[in-house]
Amino acid sequence: MNVLLLKPDFHDRHSFVCGEGELDNYLKKYALQDVKRNLTKVFVLEGKRSEEIVGYYTLSPLSFSKNEMKPELSQKLPRYPIPAILLGRLAVSIDYQKQGIGALLLMDAFLRVYQVSEESFGIYAIVVDAKNDNASSFYKHFGFTNFLDKKDRLFLPLENIKALVS
Ligand SMILES: CC(C)(COP(=O)(O)OP(=O)(O)OC[C@H]1O[C@@H](n2cnc3c(N)ncnc32)[C@H](O)[C@@H]1OP(=O)(O)O)[C@@H](O)C(=O)NCCC(=O)NCCS
């Protein structure tokens, strides 16, 4: 199964249903616009029919302040903005959930970000936006930690990711 960049006139964005309307809607209505404007990259896992989207995730850069982190986790970090990559959305088609696909997509994102961090520029962590409590618990299962005062935003330092992908 292939994870690759969303192809505008090829992948079937309109049939995708994951059970979280906002994530379905994003793929149908906004993903292509964001890609065209260089705001994000959208990666899809193809099904047996290669037009079928089994799951997708998005990546874009962001930065955050050490003040947003629990003090015990930020002691060695500078006061200037901390570079990170936002895994803004991750969703698996309802027909394929609970079969390891979410983990596969997450690992694919980890590997991609890790490679960029090794070869091109500094990235301290991957940040995720969890759309609901279920998503938050999914990310915590992989070691993500909450920011202070933000129930839905979590992060995982690259040093932890390095241990997972190597
Ligand atoms: C959340 C979601 C991405 C999980 O994908 P999935 O393919 O069903 O999950 P997987 O089968 O890959 O699960 C991988 C591991 O995570 C665990 N896991 C899955 N969902 C979990 C949850 N809600 N809480 C805790 N652990 C969870 C599994 O038990 C499994 O553990 P194991 O490797 O130790 O066996 C999927 O259910 C989904 O798309 N939901 C709707 C959209 C959504 O909420 N997206 C979240 C990002 S905003």
Image (spheres, grey):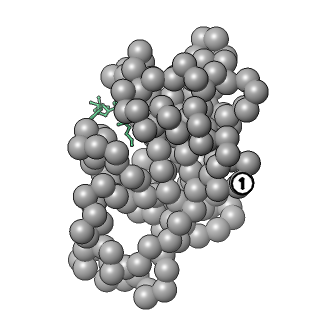
Label 1: element kind: loop
Q: Is residue 56 left or right of residue 98?
A: right
33 left or right, relative to 69: right
Q: Is residue 49 above or below residue 36?
A: above
Q: Residues within 10 Å of mark 1 (few under 14, many from 20)?
A: few
Which residue lies most toward the top here?
A: 48
Q: Residue at x 52, y 59 (%)?
A: 85
Foreground: 157 or 102? Answer: 102
- Is residue 37 placed above or below 92 in the rendered structure? below
Picture coordinates of residue 96 (x, y %)? 42, 18
* Residue corresponding to mark 1: 37
The answer, for residue 141, to whether it is visible in the render is no
Q: Residue 1, located in which quarter of the rendered image?
A: top right
Q: Is residue 129 above or below residue 42?
A: below
Label 1 CB less than 8 angstroms from ligand 1: no
Q: Which percent across, then down, holds residue 81?
A: 49, 80
Give the amino acid type for the residue marked by disc 1 in the picture: Arg
* Image quadrant assignment for residue 160: bottom left
Pick the residue in front: 129 or 137.
129
Relative placement, left or right, of 52 versus 159 is: right
The total of numbered circles placed on residues is: 1
Asked whether residue 65 appears in the rendered view, the answer is yes
**Residue shown at 70%/55% (left/top)?**
38
Residue lying at 48% horizontally and 75% vertically, measured from the top left: 82
Which percent across, then down, holds residue 78? 44, 86
Image point 69% across, 64% down: which residue? 120
Q: Residue furthest bottom?
A: 79
Quarter, ligand 1: top left
Q: Is residue 86 above or below residue 7?
A: below
Q: Position of residue 71 (x, y in %)?
A: 25, 79
